[in-house]
Amino acid sequence: MGPTSRPSTSPPAIDPKLPMAPQVYGNIRQSILHLRLMPKQALSEKELALMLGVSRTPVREALIKLADDGLVDIFPQRGTFVAPIRVSEVLEAQFIREALEVSVVARVAERSDPEVVARLRESLARQKRAADAGDPEGFMVEDENFHFILSASVSLARAWKVIQNVKGQLDRVRIMSLPEPGHLGELYEQHLAIVEAIASGSAAAARKHMTKHLQQVFRTIDSLRKQRPDIFD
């Protein structure tokens, strides 16, 4: 995926011409992250296989991998369930993400490449349209793209892959918060401040604004735990 590629929030259809296992894994993972499969919900291999139009074997393999990701709990003799949102894991993912992305954005600002700034501004324009339209899923797509552009633009795409691997629990919290009134606009303004810091070549300002942006999740966790204590652990 290139620097301007845009990820999708909708689970892709299974393509029989492509390897089955990674598609099934990606489909179920997206359904968990975007709360189409809710925390603590029981999962049936048979039902998932029927829903996806595949055999039970790739579903079983996907669930085992998702358990390794911390997004599924498998209990012998009891069944398989979507993992609750574990605050300790959200905070750990936040720590890792902040450590990496704050360093990434400082490097981007030091280079202050006009082409990168232009791509980030294009992303901002799409974010603004999604925020104005009250489209949280569209905003999430562009939010992911925005952060990917930063890592890819300084040849640190693998850093973004590391972040992706650890932030499943974190993403569910982020996605739950998007429909809150004014939240999309607030995130847009934080992204705008990051881009302005990059455009001005100020690594210190970029680090400050990225830190503030990523630490938004602490406030979000407190609010969501009060609203939905049943899905947290």
Image (cartoon, helix red, strand yellow):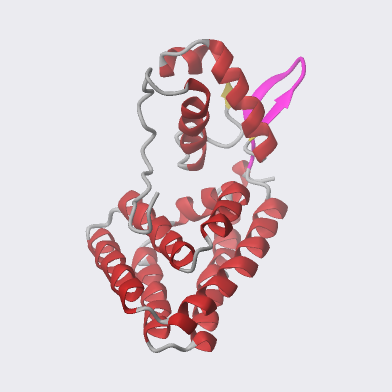
> Picture quarter containing residue 160?
bottom right
Can residue 179 be seen? no
Q: Is residue 188 magenta?
A: no
Q: Is residue 81 magenta?
A: yes
Number of numbered markers: 0
> Picture quarter containing residue 67?
top right
147 with respect to 229 (left or right)? left
Q: Residue at x 60, y 62 (%)?
A: 97
**Towards the viewer: 17 or 141:** 17
- The vertical placement of 217 against 83, above or below, is below
- Magenta extent: 73-84
Q: Residue at x 38, y 17 (%)?
A: 16
Residue 138, given in percent of the width and then of the height, sits at: 31, 52
81 with respect to 172 (left or right)? right
Residue 193, given in percent of the width and then of the height, sits at: 40, 80
87 with respect to 175 (left or right)? right
Residue 69, given in percent of the width and then of the height, sits at: 65, 39
Q: Residue at x 36, y 32 (%)?
A: 12
- The vertical placement of 10 against 6, above or below, is above
226 with respect to 177 (left or right)? right
